[in-house]
Image (tube, rainbow, N blue to C red):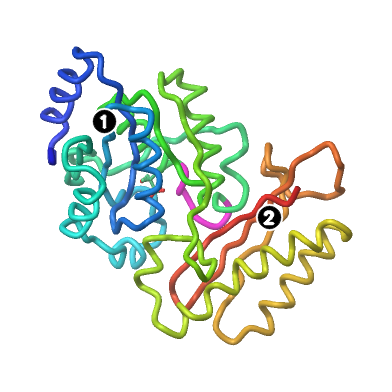
Amino acid sequence: MKIFKNKSDLSAYVDVLKSKNKSLGFVPTMGALHDGHASLIKQGLKTNDFVAVSVFVNPTQFDNKEDLLKYPRTLESDVELLKDISEDRIIVYAPSVKDIYGSDVMSTSFSYDGLEHEMEGRFRDGHFDGVGTIVKRLFEIIKPNKAYFGEKDFQQLMIIKKLVQKYHIPVQVVGCKIHRGTDGLAMSSRNLRLKPAYKNAAPFIYKILKAAKVMFGTKSANKVTEWVQNQFEKHDLLELEYFIIADADTLKTVKRKSNKKSYRAFIAVYADDIRLIDNIALN
Ligand code: PAF
């Protein structure tokens, strides 16, 4: 398996593939790979000759130093997981911070037509500037034909689509279904850090999302939101940061339901000091 640590070697390799008319899929990750990442990569391998996987914990998208420091870094086992998927059609890019940012570890400021001010944007200062900066840079280095993003980070997926549209980046962004464990918990690299009691408690999040979906069939967004907040108030281990029912196209919080629109519920929950997010389509 080809593993690149520096962008000029990777770019040169990609140029060779392109000169041979090979198509390239791309799955950006921050490592600690799990079955959710594996499913994105496998999807990429179905329609591309090669898939590039970046493994890079991007400092500029963290507003919390502690979270950045504790983010799991498991390159060796990540490479093993990738080898099990394909030894010869996956290209790994695992750069240093210096290779990506040089000495200027800063994000660029982006406008995503308001998408950045909702939910994660409200609770994680500068997060989407950091995400936009790294993803744009990776697109420029890797020049993929298609890039795959999970719907667990639904807002991120919409923001990347907006970024590509605004900057005329020639890549097709493909959204992929949320991958869940058998207990319903959405797969996330952060799950690795959950202590046993919290790991047992965390599937409650998806249970509540499913119940909220049923309730949304007959009740207003406000009533459903109140009910969800109540459920978490009664919970001993999980602390709700937000539950929001939003228009799936604008991500604006729903005031009054219309049957012409698509809605989605978004949730962020603390399990001890681990922040988990999830979402569900409501109609
Ligand atoms: O979703 C993630 O893991 C990250 O936000 C991404 C897209 C790899 C950018 O660092």
Q: How many marks?
A: 2
Q: Is residue 66 positioned above or below 262 on the image? A: below
Residue at 25 percent of width and 14 percent of height: 21
* Nearer to us in this view, 219 or 127: 219
Magenta part of the protein: which range? Answer: 122-128
Q: Which mark is residue 115?
A: none
* Nearer to us in this view, 166 or 29: 29
Residue type for callout 2? Ala
* In this rendering, position of residue 82 left or right of residue 150: left
* In this rendering, position of residue 86 left or right of residue 106: left
Residue 243, how many percent across, how many down?
Answer: 67, 62
Residue 99, how many percent across, how many down?
Answer: 17, 39
* In this rendering, position of residue 207 left or right of residue 58: right
Q: CA distance from mark 2 to mark 1?
A: 35 Å
Q: Label 1: few (<14), some or many (≥20) within 10 Å?
A: many
Q: Is residue 98 positioned above or below 207 on the image? A: above
Instruction: Give the structural element (helix, strand or loop) at label 1.
Output: strand
Q: Is residue 273 positioned above or below 257 on the image? A: below
Residue type for callout 1? Phe
